[in-house]
Image (cartoon, helix red, strand yellow):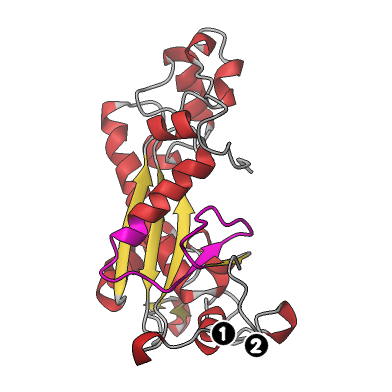
Amino acid sequence: MTDALPGLTAASRPAEPDADPRAAGYAIEEELRAALPAPDGRPPRIAGLDEVGRGAWAGPVVVGAAVTDLGAPPGLPGRGGRTVALTDSKLLTRRHREAFAEILPGWLTGHALGSASPEEIDELGMTEALRRAAIRALEALPEPPDVVILDGDRDFLRHPWRVRCEVRADQRSVSVAAASVLAKVHRDRLMADLDADFPGYGFADSAGYPSPAHQKALAESGPTPHHRLSWSYLDDLPRWRHLRRHRDPLAGEGQLSLL
């Protein structure tokens, strides 16, 4: 965590719920509530953040922010009477993601989305673009959070935000899982809308990631106005590599790994 909090070492964390290994829980949120002083006599307001689109070749990067009251998260009816639990959007089917995206806005106490365009990514690098998208999401929340849970081990928000970084938080934190679902469904829909204007790139199926159809269309027709022109894929396209943009090294803080 950027501002170290007492009692938050890995050894002191309570065990994750074992009823459903896929279900996100509240262990991280409960630790933060216990460790943070109660501002103005109320529990600390905790926002989960997650991003989608970082490694895509086209489209924006989108960050979702979600705040809960630590109540029981919604579930969906599954096969054989089982309940589909809220978890990382990548572990859910498209149908279940869409269904959760309809439920979550009415269940969450606060939610918002922020994005950074391909032009911003090209100009500033991915780290700074992520930071701007995340701040836009946080500033759009109904009330500012006291602490933010970030999925991963890198704090791209920095001062003045109080941040807790957690690897696989999108599978372990209800707040981050909710943010993950909202961000992915929103971005998938946005990319699907682009498919009608740019057929052949597979945006509706691959959401701007490098699928075979996407790579074939790029080789034949070149990048669209929604492509990131600082990405190295252009180096492998002889007809279009002259379009490659080289970012000013003094702008932003460099790109995150695309893995």
Q: Give the foreground label among 2 and 1.
A: 1
Residue to which mark 1 is pinned: 31
Q: Quadrant of the C terminus?
A: top right
Give 81 or 221, whichever is nearer the viewer.
Answer: 221
Image vertical order of residue 4 relative to residue 150, above or below: below
Percent x, y of residue 254: 58, 36
Quarter of the figure with residue 75: bottom left
Main structural element of the magenta stretch: helix, strand or loop? loop
- Whether the residues at callouts 2 and 1 have beta carbons within 8 Å, the answer is yes
Give the labeled residue for mark 2: 14
Q: Nearer the viewer, residue 85 or 186?
A: 186
Could you tell me the amino acid type at mark 2?
Answer: Pro
* Percent position of residue 4, x then y: 62, 73
Disc 2 residue crowd, few under 14, some 14–19, many 20+, Cα 10 Å: few
Judge whether 242 appears above or below 251 on screen: above
Which of the two discs, 2 and 1, labels the residue nearer the N terminus? Answer: 2
Q: Residue at x 46, y 29 (%)?
A: 122
Q: Amino acid at mark 1?
A: Glu
Residue 214 horizontal side relative to residue 7, left or right: left
Q: How far separated are the C-alphas under marks 2 and 1?
A: 8 Å
Q: Position of residue 177 (x, y in %)?
A: 47, 68
Q: State the residue lying farthest toward the right.
A: 11
Secondary structure beneath label 1: helix
Q: Which residues are magenta?
A: 137-162
Please determine whether, in this image, residue 71 is positioned above or below residue 238. Answer: below
Decide whether residue 146 is among the magenta residues.
yes
Q: Residue at x 57, y 27 (%)?
A: 249
